[in-house]
Amino acid sequence: MKPRANIHARRRLRLIAGPLALFASAHAVFAAYDILDCHAHGVVSTLNGAGVVGYRNGRFEKSFLDSPSGVSCNTTKCYVTDTGNNVIRVIDLAKSEIVNFAANDAGTAGFVDGKALACAASGETQALFNAPRGVELVPASSSYYPGHVLVADTGNGAIRLIADGDVTTITSSSASSPLDLALDTSDGSVYVVSSGTNDVKKLAYNGSTLTVYAGSVAGFFDNATATSARFSAPEGVAINSTNRKLYVADTGNHAIREIDLSSGAVSTIMGDGTASSSGTVLNQNGLLSTPARLNYPSGITYAYDSDLSSGVLMITERGTHQVRRLILTDSTASNAATITTVSGSYTGTSGFRDDVVGSGALFNTPRGISGITGNVFFVADSGNHAIRKVKLESPVDVTFTMQSVANIEKTVESHDLVIEEYGAYSVNGPPYNETTHFADVLTYLGEVHELVMCAYPSVEYFVHFEGSMQATVKDSNSYLYIGYTGKTVEDSLSRTFTLRGPGCTDLDAPNYNPYATSDDGSCVSGVKLLFSVSVTGVVDHAVYEFEGPGFYVSDSYESGSGESGFDQADEIEFVAYPGAIYTANFFGALNASLTTVSGQSGLGATSITYWTYTSADANAITSKRARVIGPGCTDPSYANYDQYATTSDEVNACTLGVTIRVELNASASAASWYDFGSIVSETPALASTLDGISLDNATHEYVAEVTVQPGVYEFKSYGAVSASVEAYDGANLVSLASWTGDTPSLQVDEYGLTSTTLYSRKLTFVPSTYSPRISGGVLSYIGGLMDADDGVSSINFPEGSIAWATSMTASFTKLAISASTESTWWYTWNVNLNTPYALVLTPNAFRLSKSATLSITYETSQVPSAEGNENLVIVKSKDGTTSSAMALNGATFDASTSKATFPIDSFGGFSVAYRPTIRSVTPPRGSLDGGDTVTIDGVDFSSISTLNTATTYQKCRFGNSFMTATTVASADVRTTLTGSDSSVTGVKLNAVSCPSPTLLYAGYTTIEFHNVENLMTSENSTFVFLQTATPSILALAPNEGAVSGGAVVHVSGNFLRAGAVASDWEKYDADTTFFHTSGPTVLSCAFGSTASRGVAVSSALAIVEAPPSASPTTTSLRLGDIAYQTSGYGAFSYVGDVLDVFTTANTVDTTGEGGVVVSVDRAVDVSATKRLIFDQWRCVFGTISVAARREVDGDYSCVSPAIASGSSVDVRFGGSLGEGSKFLGQHSAPTISSTYVDSIVDVVGTPSAIETLKTIEREPSPLFWEPLKWISTAHALVSTPGGDFTGTGQGFGHGTSGMANCTFTTDAGVVTTRVAVIVSSALVICEAPAVNVTTAFALVVSNSIQSSAGSSRTSLGPWYDATTRVHDINTDFVDDWIPSEVSASGGVYVLPSGSIASPTSSTTCYFGVSESTNFSSSLGCLIPRAIAPGFVTLAIGSSATSALDFTSQILVVPPLRAQKVSPYFVNGDGGAIFEFTGLDLYSPPGSQSPIYCGYKESGTVLPVEYVSSALVKCESIKVNGTYGFRNVIVGRRDDLEGALQRELSASPTTTTLVGLVGTFGVQQYSTPTVTSISPSGASARGGMIVGVTGTEFHIASGAARCAFDSIFVTAAVFNSTYVECVSPASYPMRTYAFTISTSGTAAQRTLDAGYRYANGTSLTFAVF
C-alpha cells in the first residue's frame, strides 16, 4: 500500500523526500497582485549560549554566558563583553567555541590592571573588570592600537586596553559610565557614549582624559555645533572613518544621529523621538508608512554594501527585540535613508528561536552588533545570554499561476461542492510564522490567479495543488519549479521547492537538492534506513506518521479493510542524516520497525535494529524515537549518551544533564474530556516524552521525569489543568515554573498573538548551575554531588574530574577517632583536632583530573578552643588515621552552617583542626642586617615540652624567608592549659624564637609560624615585622661632655630616625620633618651601657642628652633600643665637670654699662680632668650669653654686656649646652627715676612704666564680646625668654616667672585681671573689663615676680546701651534658631529650637544691642529690616529687666538686587526661560536661603539656575486661569514669603507705593495654533513663501518663527490669524513637521502640520 493523503491529529499529510522546514508567512497578497515588504532578511542561528545564565567555555549551546552586551569581530574571531560575568571572552568562528580572553574564571568584579589571563603560580596579577559593555577589536592594519582590544568597562567608569596579554586603564572617571566606543582609525581618537551623561565623549590618542565632544544635557536637538546638540541616553556608537562620520544610537530619543567629524554638525538620520509600536510599520495598503520609527535602538555598526552602492547601518532594537537595516542612500527611495527589519518578531515579541528567516527568528533585548562582511553580522543577544549570527539574504520573485479547467454544471445539489470541484491551492513556509503564506480557491471555469511572492534561498516552501486546474511555479528567470495539471477534483500534488543555486547534487545524500545548479561540496554521507509498518487481519484503527530531518510520511489503514490471517504492509526506504533523531508515532494496532539497509559501506555497514513495535490494541498510542548511527556521546554517564554513537565530536559531545520533573493535574471542575487537559512539548529533547499526554478524568495526575541539558524549553498545555516543572539539584527539587491552563496571559503564541486553539504556552529556563547527584557511588567523567554518610558533608565533582569514558566506585564515610588516636595526632603530628572524626573518601590517594569542592562539617561548639583559638584548618591524612597528616590551607569556614569548604585534588581522610595562631611578636622591628632575635608567641604551635629546642620542621616565616625556630616559654597563660582531656591535649609550649633575616630594602614583612612537616601555618596573620636601615653616626658635636651628664649632643649621620623608641615606631619615615603629625620622633640611645633619650630633627640630624658617668672615659654612642643594638656608633668622651675645673671670678661689673673684663681662674692640679676642647665655654649674664676667651695661662675671661639701669643679674660660667654652670657673682646697674609715671615701683629687671593706653572697641556685639586695650610701654617684656639659672640647676628656654597679666583697678578698689598678650617689648594687648557707665581704672602689667609701673587713671566708657534687662522666662533649652540664615530684607520669622517656658505679652526678641521685635509663641521672632548683613546674636527676654543670654546667633545675608527680566512676553502654558539680571544674585552652596522664582499670583516656586552673580535663569510655570499680566518674582524664600517691604513715599503729597524685592510685570499669552499652511510642500531648494493661518499669533510678543522640524526661520506676523515665512532648503526630501514658535515659548512645542519636500518643482498647490 502506498502512502496516501490522510488527515490525522495536528499534522499535514504528505510524503516528502528532501529537506523540509515547517514554517510559513503571510508574505504575498493574492488578488491584489502586489509584493509586500520585499527586502533582504536575515537567517538567524546561535553561535554560543543556550538561553540561560551561566559561565562556561565550550561550543555552540554547550557554552554559557550572562547578559552579553558588546561584540566586535573580524573574519576569524569575535570578542564579547560577558557583562554579567565581568569577563571579556573570545569566539573562534571556525569552531563556534568561546573561551575566556581577559578576567578570571570566577567572574570576579573588580578594577585591577594586570594580565588578561594571569598565572597565579608565577605571581602575575589578574586583571579584573566590572560589568563591561562596549568592545572594539582594532584592525591589525590600523596605525593606532593595531590588533588590540578596547573595552568600555562600564561598572568601573573606565576605558581599558588589552594588548599583548596585558590589561591597562587608559582613562577612568567615577562620573562617567561608558556604554560603547568606536575608534577613528584616521587619527586614533576613541569616541565614547555614556547614557548617564547624555553625550558623546572623545579620548584623543595617547590622551588620558575624556572630553565632551557632542551633547551635554538630555534633549533631542540637532545643531551645527556638536556641543549644542542634545541626546538622550545614547547606548551605541559606530564610525565611518573614511567619510569622517560618526553614528549614534540615540536610545532615549528612539533615533539614529549622525555627527560630521569634519564640521561637528549633528543631524538626525532616522527617528522623530517617538517609539515605534513595532519594527516595520505597514499601512492599510501594505506599503511601508512614514515616518519610520525606532524603539530604543541600542547597538549599531557601519558597513558598506556594494550591491546597494550605499553605506548601511545595522541596528539592534531592544524595545522591539529586532535587528534593523538602515540604508543611508537608498536608490529606490530618491537616495533618501530607509530602514527595514531583517530579523526579529514583527510584533516586537521577545523569544529565543533559531534557524529561520526574518521575523520568524526571535531575540530578547539585543544590544551590541558587529559585522564581518556586508551580509554577515553577529549580535549580543543579552536577554537570551547568547551570541547570534545574522546572515542577510536577498529575495527572488517567484510567480504562481493557477487556472481552473473543469467545466462542471452548477446545480442546487452540487452548490456546496463547487469550491472543492474547481480546485484549491496553498503555499506555506517561512519567514514569518507557521501560518499559510497564501491560499485560495478557483470558483468558475477559466478563472486565473497569478501571484508574486518574495522567496529566499535558504527557505524550503511547501506547495499544495488540489482539483481540476493547471498551475505553474516560476522564478523571474522563467525557470519552472513545479508544473501541475489536475483533471478531476480528486487529483492533487504536494511538493517542496527551494530556489535554484549551488547545492548538493548527490542523489544518495540526505541533503540532495533537486534544484541545485552545481555541487557546492555540501553533500552529507548518509545512512540508508528501512521503515517497515504493517497490520494483520481486519483493521479496526491503525494510523502512523514518521518524521525527521529531510523526511516525513503519514498514512492510515482504512477501517474494516484486510482479511483475517493476512497482512497489509508498507516498506519505505530513505537516506537519513548521521546522528539525527527520527520519531515515529503510532495510533492503534500496528507492527513496525526501523533498521539499516544491508549492503552499505561506511556508517551504514553496521546492521542495527533501532526499534520494533507491536500492538494489537486499537486504542494504543505510542511513540518511538531513534538516533541514527554517527558522531555523538559515547560516555554512558551522560544524559545524552547514545549507544549507536561512533565517536564523540565537539558538536555532539556529551553534555551535562539536568533531570526535570513535569507534573500535570486535571481540573476538579472540568466539564469535558478537553478540560481534563493535556500537555505537549515540541522541543526535541522532550517531544518523545511529552507528545500529546492527555488526562482522562478530574482526578487524573501525570508525572514525567526527563534529563535535559541547560537551556530554554517550551511547554503547551490544553484545558483547565495545573502544571509545574521542577529540576533536581542533587537530591533537592527546585521549582522552575508553574501555571494553570486557563490563564489568559499564557494563551498566546511565540509572537504574542492569541492562540487559535487556546493552548497555554509556558517557557521554562533550565539553569546551568545545578549539580547532578551521584547515585550508587559511581563516579564518572560527568561528575556530580556525592554525599557523605553523616548526612551533612559532601563533595562536588566537576565535569572532567576523572578520565573520559571511565567510571569508578567511590565512598565518602565518617570514621570516628578515639581519644588515644587524637592524642597521637597531637604528639606525633602537632595537630590539635577540632572534630573527633574524619570523613574518608575512597579509594585512597586517587588523584583527580580537576579539583573537586569538599564540604565537611565541624564542631562550632568547640570554637574557640580551651586555649582561646578560633582559627581552623582542614587536615588531610591518607586514610583518616594518623599517617601523613597534612594541613590544607585556604579553606572557608561558615559557622552558620557548621561547614568547611575546600578544593581537593586527591582522595583521603579529612578532618578539622585548630590552626597555629600568633598572638604577639617581639620586638616588632629590627635592622636590615638581620640577626635580631624575634619571639613569636601564640597557641597550637607545638607539642614539644622542652624549652630551647630547635627542630628542622618548625620555622618562622618572614615574607618568603624561612628561619629555624627554637621553642621558648610563652607569655600567655592559656597555652599551659591541658584542655578538656589531659590525656589527649597535653601541655603546649606555644612560643618560638627565630633570628630575623637579612634584607636589602627597608619595609614591613608579614610574619608567620610554619611547620614544614604538616604544612601547618598561622596564615593571614595580622602581625608584621619592620626591618629598617641601621642608624649610621658620622659625627658628634660636641663629642665630649661633663661626667655629671646633661650635655646636649648633636648627632649627624644617616637613617637616624630608625632609632625611634617603641612608642614612636609608627612615625618612622626617612623623609618626614621634625614635627610629625603627632610630634617629633623620640629616639632611644645608649652611651656605652647606659640608656638615654633624644629627638630626631630629621633622618640626618638628631639631638640626644648625655647621661652622667662615674668617671672620665671614652664610650660608644649608639641609636636604638639598648636591648637591640645597632652597628653604627660614635665615640663620646666624658671629662671633668666645670665645677671642678674653675674657681670664682675675680672681677665683676657694677656700672651696668658693660665692657668690664671678668676673669675666670682655672683650678690648679687638675690635669686629669683637662678638657680636650674648650670652644663651648661661656659666661651668662642673666639671660645674655657671652663667649669666653682663653688666656695664655689657661685661665678664661669674658666681657660684660650692658644691662638696664636699676637691674641686677647673676653671672655664671658654663660649658656646653645642658651642662651645669658655676656662679661667679652678680652684675648690677644703678637705678634711675622715671619721669613718665605717677609713682615708681622698683622691681629688679623691670625697665620703665606704661606710656600710652588706647582702647580698640568693636562694632556693637553681645555682652561677652569686650573691647581690647592696647598698652604701649617702653619695655614691657615682663615674661622674658631667659631663665633664672641659680645654684646648680640646669635648663634652657623660658624662665619660671609665669604668664603676664593686665590688672585693672577701679577707684573703688574693684580689681579685674586679664591675660596679657605681649606683642613686643613696647606693645601689650589685653581685654578690658565691661562697664555700664564710664569708669576710671589704674592699669598694671605684671607676672609672678615682677610688674610694670602703673598707668595713669584711664577712663573706659560703656560699649553698648546698657538697657536694664533680666530673664523672666526659661531659655536654657534654646539650642538654635530655624532658619539660622535669613535675608536682610526682613519680614520673615525665625523659631527657637528648644523649650521656651511661659512667654508673656512683654516677651521681646533682641537682635544684638540695637534692634528688637515682639516675640510670637506661634511664629517666633520677626526679623527687623534695619539689621545690616552679617552675623547677629539673638536672645529672648523682657524689656523691663536685664542680663540677656546671648548664646545664639543667626546669619543675615544681603538681599538680592534684580534689575531686569527677559522676555516680557511669555507663553501661558509654561516652559519659557526667564533671565534675571542684577547684582548679588548668588546664594552659596549649602545655603539655607537658596534663590527661587515664581509668579506672585501662584503658590508654586522653582529653583533658579546660577549663571553668575549678575545672571540667573528660571523656567516659567503654567498658571491656571485667564492669560494676562502677571508679576514674576525672584528672591530667597524670605523675600517671596515674608511680609511686604516697608512703604516708600514718592512725595509727601502722593499716595504711598508698596514695593517687593525682585518683582517684575510680564505679559502672558496663549499658545499659537496652526490650522493650515499653503502650499503644503515645495522643492528641496526652498525659497517658497508659506502662508500660515491659525489663532493666537501675537504681534506684541516679539519675534515669531516658523519651525520646519528643527530648522527655524523668521516669520512675519500680520495679525493674530495670519503669518508668512519663507521655506528653507532642506535634505533629505521628506515630510517635515511644521509649527509656529514665538518668543517666550519652550524650545519646540507639539507639532501641528507637515511640510513635504520633493524633487523638482511640479507641485500642485491649493488656492489660499
Image (tube, grey):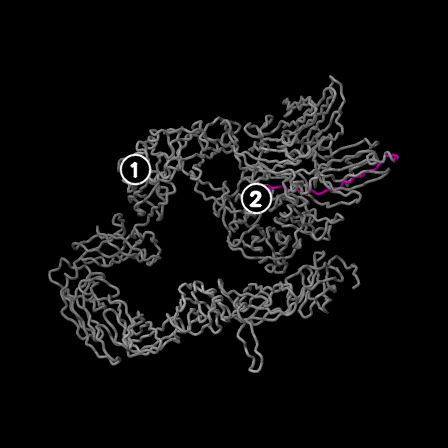
**Contact check, label 1 and label 2, Cβ < 8 Å:** no
Q: Does the magenta portion include 400?
A: yes
Instruction: Write down the residue under mark 2.
Output: 67
- The part of the image, by quadrant, that contains residue 894 is top left
Q: Is residue 617 left or right of residue 1392?
A: right
Mark 1 residue crowding within 10 angstroms, few (<14) / some (14–19) / many (20+): some
Instruction: Write down the residue under mark 1.
Output: 977
Position of the N terminus by quadrant? top right
Q: Which residue lies furthest to the top in this view?
A: 565
User: Looking at the image, can residue 801 be seen?
Assistant: yes
Residue 721 at x, y = what percent?
64, 35
Q: Is residue 1283 left or right of residue 293?
A: left
Please, is residue 340 above or below residue 1253 in the view?
above
Residue 132 at x, y = what percent?
54, 47
Toward the viewer: 99 or 1365? 1365
Mark 2 residue crowding within 10 angstroms, few (<14) / some (14–19) / many (20+): many
Q: In this view, does 883 lie to the left or right of 1453?
A: left
Toward the viewer: 593 or 1329? 1329
Residue 26 at x, y = what percent?
73, 42
Please, is residue 505 above or below residue 991 in the view?
above
Indicate which label's residue lies in the foreground, 1 or 2. 1
Q: Which residue lies furthest to the bottom in this view?
A: 1549
The three-letter code of the residue at mark 1 reads Leu
Looking at the rendering, the stretch of residues picked out in magenta corresponds to 383-411
Of labels 1 and 2, earlier in sequence is 2
- Which numbered disc covers residue 813? none
